[in-house]
Image (cartoon, rainbow, N blue to C red):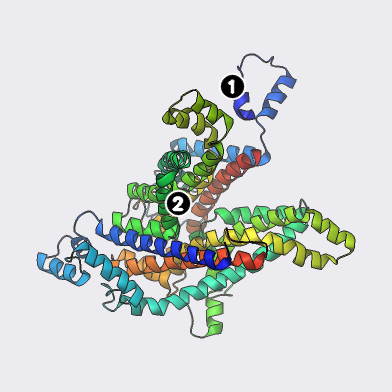
Amino acid sequence: MGRPAYIGNRLLLMVFVLFGVTLVIFSMVRLIPGDPAFLILGDRATEENAAQLREQLGLNKPLPQQYWEFVSGMVTGKMGTSLLYRQPVSNLVVKRVPVSIFLAVYAMILAAIMTLSFGLLAALHKGRIADHFIRILFLFFITTPAFWLGLLLIMLFSLRLHIFPVAGYGLTFQDHLRYLFLPALTLALGLSAVLIRNLRGQTINVMRADYVRTARAKGVPEGSILSRHTLQNALMPVVTIFGLQFGYLVGGTVVVETIFAIPGMGQLLYQSITARDYPVVQAIVVISAVLVILVNLGVDLSYSFLDPRVTYE
Amino acid sequence: MNEPAAAALEPLGRAAPTRDGLVLRIRRLRLNGMLVGGTIMLGLVILAALAAPLLTPYDPIAQDLNSTLLPPGSPGHWLGTDNFGRDEFSRIIYGTRLDLQIGFIAVLFPFMVGTLVGVLTGFVGGTLDSAVMRLVDILMAFPFLILVIAIMSILGPGLKNLYIAIALIGWISYARITRGETLAARNLEYVRAATTVGCTRARIMRLHILPNVISPALIYVFTGMVLAIMTGATLSFLGLGPQPPTPEWGAMIAEGRQFLLQAWWLTALPGVALLIVGVALSLIGDGLAERR
């Protein structure tokens, strides 16, 4: 199978998964034991108010129609009205998506820098002090919950050393870089802990390969061996792991945005859950799933660029 | 049969208790540094959880408003006190009980269901396999934490719902691991031999496949426990877990957050406890994986 056919198949699967994702979210809210209207309004709400809310949420319509409106709304951007903010969900979300994406990309860049430098350093110094130090340090970051790490960073860098702001997002691009550094670092440390481990292992494996020895025997400079022969081959599995970890990154934004008071999607999700603002919850969960699906599609497709031998079967 | 299992089956009284015999037997367990270190750490943590009332002179939820926010090293409160004057050491030690319990219970159900689903789909194949794997595709599209939070928001906060939320998604990893192993084992000779002598499919799955494919899933249990404990702590931190004044590490960190400037220990110390448990379980998991 060539690349176009593979991409076609992959897209078809994606459409199916998207359908499933919307169905899961849709039924989750409808499966709430009891009446969602009373759950949102509280037990002391009047029947009149409940009926009004059911009308507003479209809960009084037949289920297939509700599902159709939900899905078409997701596509066209009519995602209902927030119960808390009393404005269209799309307005709320549109303002916050760029913030979260900024944070996620920032975290990915930091993670990439840390992974490449520490991963290679550990691999090249295998069994020596630098290697042990990096492995033990990042073993801790693998098991450190993001919310705690974030608070520790605030205590150290914001409250004691006053290097970075405690919370917020800032106004200009430079502001964003400064305000989001600690949050991005929090996410990046957890992410790179997994990636460094992988890159180290892969690099050590590849360095043992015959073609690396041949290249060395031919007198290829060490830097070129590392970048052209080793890294390119060692990176492929790491990219796969990254795709699998992207969900962790998106989930992490909920925690990190809440701690650092960043006005992104994660913070909105947390607020909406506390306020039982289901239209917003639905929209954000669907959007986050779509992001994960797209990133994994990208990862799958990137193989053919990282490794020309890959043909899609 | 793999080596450690053979070693375990060896009648205990037979080998003479010479030094060589003992060394040999220990070597057969193929222990490594990570495994030993992790097991000792976890053992100490479990001991602390069991002996909580003996280790701490204070009730973890007893308030003492005359001695609030004492720093670590204060007389009588060597890890300090919180804003209600509750002894921080007692709360952390009692928290061990709850957080370990979350780790154990939250993997129990996913492990059982996941391995069964994995063996079933891997062995039976066909429509059942495709259907379950598509369901897995769908559930894997959600970021784990976001889906758990969303489920909790619908079920409501609390420990029981936490278990349900983690179980609804947690089975996937075990199912995928076991399914892969089963696909490989399905065509091996001992399975074909069992088919030839007329064993039923249920019997083959139960007695031939399951015991042979379960160890990778068992090893993953330790990773799963770390994940469950961290998720549980995160949800408590967000106010969706066990409700105050229950001593739970994530909830304690959330309470300590209001005193970041005055009382760093309220945030830092429960996290250290989480870290110790996490590292212990990870070491065991990695040590077991390395042994295979």
Q: Name the one closer to the observer, B147 or A58.
A: A58
Where's residue B152, x and y in %? 34, 56
Tell me the amino acid under the disc marked 1. Answer: Leu
Q: Quick one: quadrant of the N terminus of chain A? A: bottom right
Does residue A231 appear left or right of residue A54 in this picture? right
- Characterize the local packing of mark 2: few (<14), some (14-19) or many (20 or more) Cα atoms within 10 angstroms: many
Q: Where is residue A62 in the image (x, y as percent from the top left)?
A: 18, 64
Per the model, the C-alpha gap separating discs 1 and 2 is 40 Å
Residue denoted by label 1 = B9
* Quarter of the picture holding the C terminus of chain A: bottom right
Query: Image quarter for residue A239?
Result: bottom right
Depth check, mark 1 against mark 2: the one in front is: 1
Q: Which residue is drawn at 15% across and 66% down?
A: A50
**Which residue occupies 35% across, 69% down?**
A283
Query: Can I make out residue A294 in this image?
Result: yes
Q: Residue B249 carries which label?
A: 2
